[in-house]
Amino acid sequence: MNPLDPPSLSLRPIGYVRTASRAKFDAPSQPKHDASEVNFLELLPDQQFELALQDLASFDRIWILWWFDRNTQWRPRVMPPRGPAVRRGVFATRSPHRPNPLGLTCVSLISVEGRTLKVGPLDLMDGTPIFDIKPYLRTVDAHPDSSLGWLEEIEQAAQQPPPFRIELSPIADRQLAWLRENWNVDFTERAFVILERDPSPHRTRRVLQMDTNRYRIACGAWRMFFRVENDVVIVEEVDKGYSDETLQSHIGDEMLDRDAQIAFALWKSSLGG
């Protein structure tokens, strides 16, 4: 053992997040504080956590300390999803690609029922491990006059109306309606928020230029293809994110929207698409 190496530490989850966000694309970069979304934090049984939660219900907001459990490596410089395609030092960002992938989120607390906390909007995926919960204290945790660093200009721009608007081609409109009506699949809200602000190619936002004025944004298990004309983002079509071979080779596996993608491919084929 290298004497310069720090000792390792052992942590155990106290519970897990329960939310509708099943993929990274579904979870926003920050919680949407003006949304009516409801989520849950389920703490583990037989740990006396019911006693540990005593008196917490009187607070309006809490801090959640959690683990970026989908990450396997860290990067000293990362490209944040907000703003231009510029790499920043990871400690100047909230990127998941950290030496110790710890996350910190402030969330509204709705109620405490036994070992379950009912909370407001979250930026976490379903099943995220939770390490700790602390009350938010406005007297010590709020510093509204603090500098936002490199995010200052981006935050100011976010207060302005989006510079782009979205239009759907007849094909895209029909495809998205079919997914909603038949499979309850709808990834447009998150995708449109991204594209209305900046549809330019960006690795972290997963926007890729395919050809001259043809772009693709990856939306979890789905893909959206679009072009840009002046201040209009025109969505031309959508498609599944996995190949037919991959979908068939994962029978029985937990692949996001697998059955919906297979059905979508058959439906498109029946239309000659």
Image (cartoon, rainbow, N blue to C red):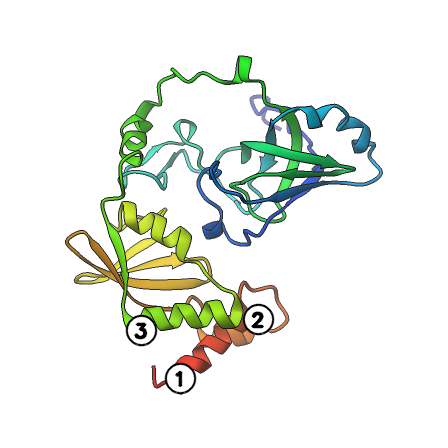
Comparing labels 3 and 2, the label whose residue is closer to the camera: 3
Q: Measuring 23% from the left and 49% from the top, which residue is drawn there? A: 164
Q: Measuring 54% from the left and 40% from the top, which residue is drawn there? A: 122
Q: Name which of mark 1 and mark 3 comes first in the sequence.
A: 3
Instruction: State the residue in front, 78 or 38.
Output: 38
What residue is pinned by disc 2?
250
Question: Helix or strand or loop: what does disc 2 sit on?
Answer: loop
Q: Spatial distance from mark 1 to mark 3, Cα to Cα?
A: 14 Å
Return the mark for residue 269. Answer: 1
Q: Measuring 42% from the left and 63% from the top, which residue is drawn there? A: 222
Q: 10 Å neighbourhood of mark 1: few (<14), some, or many (≥20)? A: few
- Disc 1 and disc 3 in contact, CB within 8 angstroms: no
Q: 10 Å neighbourhood of mark 3: few (<14), some, or many (≥20)? A: some
What residue is pinned by disc 3?
171
Instruction: State the residue in front, 107 or 217.
Output: 107
Relative to 147, does residue 190 appear above or below in the rendering? below
Comparing labels 1 and 3, the label whose residue is closer to the camera: 3
Q: Position of residue 107 (x, y in %)?
A: 56, 33
